[in-house]
Amino acid sequence: MELQEKVPVPIFTEVAKEHFLREIYPERRPAVLRGWSLGSCLEKWTVEYLGQKGGDKEVKIHVSAVPQMDFLHKNFVYKTLPFNEFVKRASEKKHSDFFLCEDESYYLRSLGEDVRKEPADLSKQFPDLAEDFHIPQFFAPEQFFSSVFRISSCGLQLWTHYDVMDNLLAQVTGMKRVVLYSPQDALHLYLSGRWLRRDASGCDKSEVLDIDSPDLRRFPEFVKAKRYECVLEPGDLLFIPALWFHNTLALQFGVGVNVFWRHLPADCYDKKDPYGNKDPVAATRALQALERALHILDELPADYRDFYGRRMIQRIQNRTHCDGCYQAGGRETQNAR
């Protein structure tokens, strides 16, 4: 089988804020930051401690009979458990109490108190645990959007998707593999859904569920996507720039915190988006206009649709393509044309 080109995500040790902002952040590429002080969480956040501090607060969780969760086809169910019971089950490989089967997998993505209006904030949903975690101050306080608490069973794998905000994934306990793909490889990732409504089944997710053994008869272009990969250890921070696709695999029972911030002007984002995953307002308008244009093309015979569709593609390529936007100022792709 033809294999993807693999690139290790660079690791930077004991990076100061000034170095990150001057040397790493402008490159718009993923980076592992090792040696940053995340607080006492690295020592304290055992299963017992988490259960004690989180108590019996009820949390909404994903439960799946298989470890590879698929958001497109919903191979999981949503359930509610007391936080301490959830942590206990998520840390087990076999369960005496279960919903689907004794080796089911669990995943928590924390939510705001009002899930339709408020972003997740560790300091509000889990204030006792938030005292142990130091959010890296790599952005201005007014840019902060959310801090998302994530807990995964060993072996749990999440679907490949992108976010529209920059974020830092802090790995507190356990080890996690992360595979990333550049925004420039979007056309090789078989995005699902329609742009007119980017909702739970929208275009931010890849149809290629098994990225390690993909079905190349269905997804022949997937091998053209360059695969960036790293393994996060406790204490590591992974900088994931906006629009970079990522797929995570928990190599052990793991606890982490995602910190998202608005790196674009605030009015670029949808104000009614508590998850922070809706496309920027201008992008949504443009994509909706494209959908309308495609419907208009349907009024023409097939050969005319093909001809004018190709002209639209050429126009988009000439107007928007930016080979150097995501990779070290374009050094890797300046000569691609």
Image (spheres, rainbow, N blue to C red):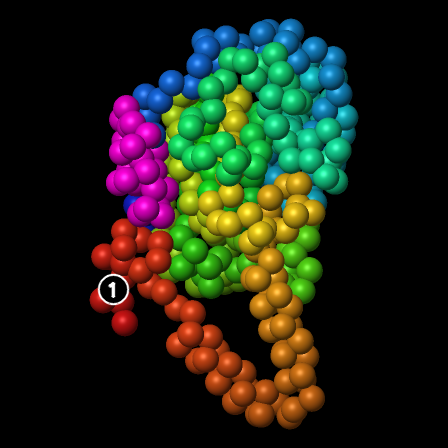
Q: Residue at x 63, y 72 (%)?
A: 289
Q: Is residue 129 above or below residue 236?
A: above
Depth check, front residue: 188 or 112: 112
The N terminus lies in quadrant: bottom left
Q: Position of residue 279 (x, y in %)?
A: 58, 55
* Residue type of the residue flagged with mark 1: Gln
Depth check, front residue: 268 or 240: 268
Mark 1 element type: loop
Observer able to see residue 245: no
Q: Is residue 53 above or below residue 335?
A: above
Q: Residue at x 40, y 59 (%)?
A: 184
Task: Tell me if 81 is positioned left or right of 156 in this view.
Answer: right
Q: Position of residue 129 (x, y in %)?
A: 58, 14
Mark 1 surroundings: few (<14), some (14-19) or many (≥20) residues within 10 A = few
Mark 1 — residue? 334
Q: Position of residue 163 (x, y in %)?
A: 53, 47
**Circle count:** 1
Task: Tell me if 21 is positioned left or right of 179 in this view.
Answer: left
Observer able to see residue 258: yes
Depth check, front residue: 92 or 285: 285
Residue 19 within the segment the image draws in magenta: yes
- For the record, the magenta segment spans 8-32
Q: Residue at x 42, y 45 (%)?
A: 241
Q: Residue at x 35, y 22 (%)?
A: 36
Q: Quadrant of residue 8?
A: top left
Residue 327 within the segment the image draws in magenta: no
Q: Is residue 113 above or below residue 214?
A: above
Q: Is residue 262 above or below residue 103?
A: below
The C terminus lies in quadrant: bottom left
Q: Position of residue 110 (x, y in %)?
A: 64, 29
